[in-house]
Image (cartoon, rainbow, N blue to C red):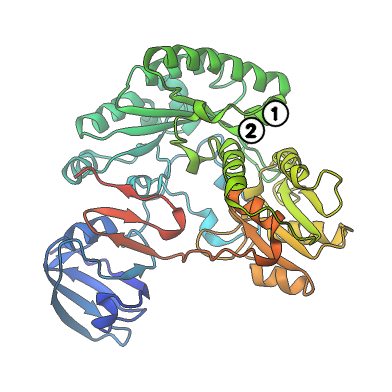
């Protein structure tokens, strides 16, 4: 008998079938048409039928069968507490560069979960190493057309990859990619680049091997290793300096020119941090081919700038005189400053405040890793007399107004009762907030997991739907 993993309902959408059936938060869906569900992938495919029987367990422990008819593409209208009902498959590797091991104390528990689950890779673009996957997993990928996936390659030298991941079985990455291809899956890839380890000649080998796997390989992202002050791993890692970052850019640009000449797209993309470290401008939008790895932070800065430019055409030609403080990580602060000066060249009312990351250490300089405590500390020290504060939405947990250190946006607002604090997610948001702060507001999506008909899946806050190839 198949083990039952309940899908716990977090939210019932208004006007939905679920509301009509009087399902409520806390109800558990145990089976659909007699079949147990492992995750929202199983649930989505089962719900494609037009005649449905749900085995539901209510919060008081009672169970009932709920039967109904629906259209093929009609949704039940619930959000789940988790996307995988049987538990996240965790990572068994012990990578030299694992960021989870560098989180530090007093952070929310979920940050310590090392997920390495191919289902979350398909659903939300999480990167997986493929080291914990077997024949049954690849068979399911083939059967359900789960594509694309996102793969942490790191390097294609078998001995070096096994060493970097501290797992003997990690060396056969090319064999695992063969299995993905045999299952009919396409995939995006990533390299976390470590100075003196998988860069230089090793990076050349990796790029060559992955580029040769086109068209199954859709893209290759290269990001610099991030190190926090909490890292205790004895293996020596150092971050790239200005010259080292410049060398990586030069090496990758040669490959970009070659591949663009072959097929008119870039294929290989560098994390924004390399350009910040090297003191170079991020590439133009055309070099990102539609930003296929935007959720991985690849091209975020250029995309933000492009959104800012497009917003100019859609906003009326009036501005308010609200004094604003713009919170930013130290890396992207010069970009935020440059854009702000377009609207306020004399720096009369818009002030950009680069916030040092005291929790992770100053070498961690991206906006998305700022903690609530660090932002509050910086605002207390600032003397702008601001009426409003703009904070990066990326610093808040997806779907919830909670920072990495469990400080809530409400907590922050209570700390500054006479100042309006608003999150900003996009370049268009930024321009509108700076120009018309009095009328600026953005609702944030919920943090629940839901399903979409025709075998599509989404977490509403992600903004991107990973769709099956069926």
Position in image of residue 280 (x %, y %): 69, 24
Residue 277 is marked as 1
Give the residue displayed 32% in from the left and 21% down from the top.
213
Pick the front one: 321 or 442: 321
- Quadrant (top left/top right/bottom left/bottom right) for the N terminus: bottom left
Label 1: state its secondary structure: helix
Above or below residue 335? Residue 236 is above
Residue 39 visible to the viewer: no
Position in image of residue 438 (x %, y %): 70, 66
Give the residue displayed 62% in from the left and 29% down from the top.
282
Within-10-Å neighbours for mark 1: few <14, some 14–19, many 20+? some
Q: From the viewer's perspective, tell me whether residue 349 is left or right of residue 39.
A: right
Position in image of residue 445 (x %, y %): 48, 64
Label 2: state its secondary structure: helix
The part of the image, by quadrant, that contains residue 434 is bottom right
Position in image of residue 36 (x %, y %): 18, 64
Q: From the viewer's perspective, tell me whether residue 189 is left or right of residue 15.
A: right
Within-10-Å neighbours for mark 2: few <14, some 14–19, many 20+? many
Give the residue displayed 46% in from the left and 64% down from the top.
447
Give the residue displayed 26% in from the left and 55% down from the top.
41
Residue 273 is marked as 2
- Quadrant (top left/top right/bottom left/bottom right) for the C terminus: top left
Pick the front one: 126 or 418: 418
Pick the front one: 278 or 120: 278
Alpha carbons under labels 1 and 2: distance apart = 6 Å
């Amino acid at each position: 008998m198949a083990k039952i993993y309940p899908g716990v309902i977090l939210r019932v959408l208004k006007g939905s079938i679920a509301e009509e059936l009087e399902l409520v938060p806390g109800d558990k869906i145990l089976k659909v048409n007699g079949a147990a569900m492992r995750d929202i992938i199983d649930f989505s495919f089962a719900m494609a039928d037009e005649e449905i029987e749900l085995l539901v367990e209510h919060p008081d422990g009672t169970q009932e069968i709920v039967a109904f008819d629906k259209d093929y593409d009609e949704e039940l209208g619930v959000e789940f507490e988790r996307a995988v009902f049987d538990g996240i498959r965790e990572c068994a590797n012990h990578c030299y560069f694992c960021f989870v091991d560098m989180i530090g104390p007093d952070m929310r528990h979920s940050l310590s979960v090392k997920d390495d689950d191919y289902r979350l890779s398909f659903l939300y673009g999480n990167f997986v190493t493929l080291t914990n996957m077997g024949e049954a997993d690849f068979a399911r990928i083939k059967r359900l057309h789960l594509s694309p996936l996102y793969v942490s390659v790191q390097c294609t030298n078998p001995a070096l990859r096994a060493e970097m991941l501290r797992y003997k079985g990690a060396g056969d990455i090319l064999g695992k990619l063969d299995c993905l291809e045999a299952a009919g899956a396409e995939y995006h890839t990533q390299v976390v680049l470590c100075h003196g380890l998988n860069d230089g000649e090793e990076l050349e080998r990796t790029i060559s091997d992955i580029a040769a796997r086109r068209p199954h390989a859709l893209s290759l992202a290269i990001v610099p290793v991030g190190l926090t002050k909490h890292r205790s791993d004895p293996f020596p890692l150092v971050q790239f300096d200005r010259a080292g970052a410049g060398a990586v850019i030069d090496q990758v640009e040669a490959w970009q020119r070659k591949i663009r000449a072959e097929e008119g797209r870039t294929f290989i993309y560098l994390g924004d941090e390399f350009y910040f470290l090297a003191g170079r401008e991020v590439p133009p939008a055309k070099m990102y081919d539609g930003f296929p790895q935007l959720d991985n932070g690849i091209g975020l800065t250029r995309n933000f700038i492009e959104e800012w430019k497009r917003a100019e055409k859609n906003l009326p030609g009036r501005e308010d005189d609200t004094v604003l403080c713009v919170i930013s990580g130290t890396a992207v602060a010069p970009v935020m400053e440059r854009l702000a000066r377009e609207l306020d060249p004399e720096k009369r009312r818009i002030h950009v405040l680069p916030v040092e990351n005291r929790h992770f250490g100053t070498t961690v300089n991206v906006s998305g890793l700022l903690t609530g405590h660090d932002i509050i500390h910086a605002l207390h020290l600032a003397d702008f007399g601001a009426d409003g504060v703009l904070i990066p939405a990326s610093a808040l947990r997806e779907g919830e107004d909670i920072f990495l250190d469990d400080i809530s946006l409400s907590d922050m607002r209570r700390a500054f009762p006479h100042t309006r604090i608003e999150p900003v997610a996009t370049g268009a948001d930024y321009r509108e907030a700076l120009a018309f702060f009095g009328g600026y507001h953005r609702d944030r999506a919920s943090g629940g997991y839901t399903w979409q008909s025709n075998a599509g899946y989404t977490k509403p806050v992600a903004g991107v739907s990973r769709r099956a190839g069926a």
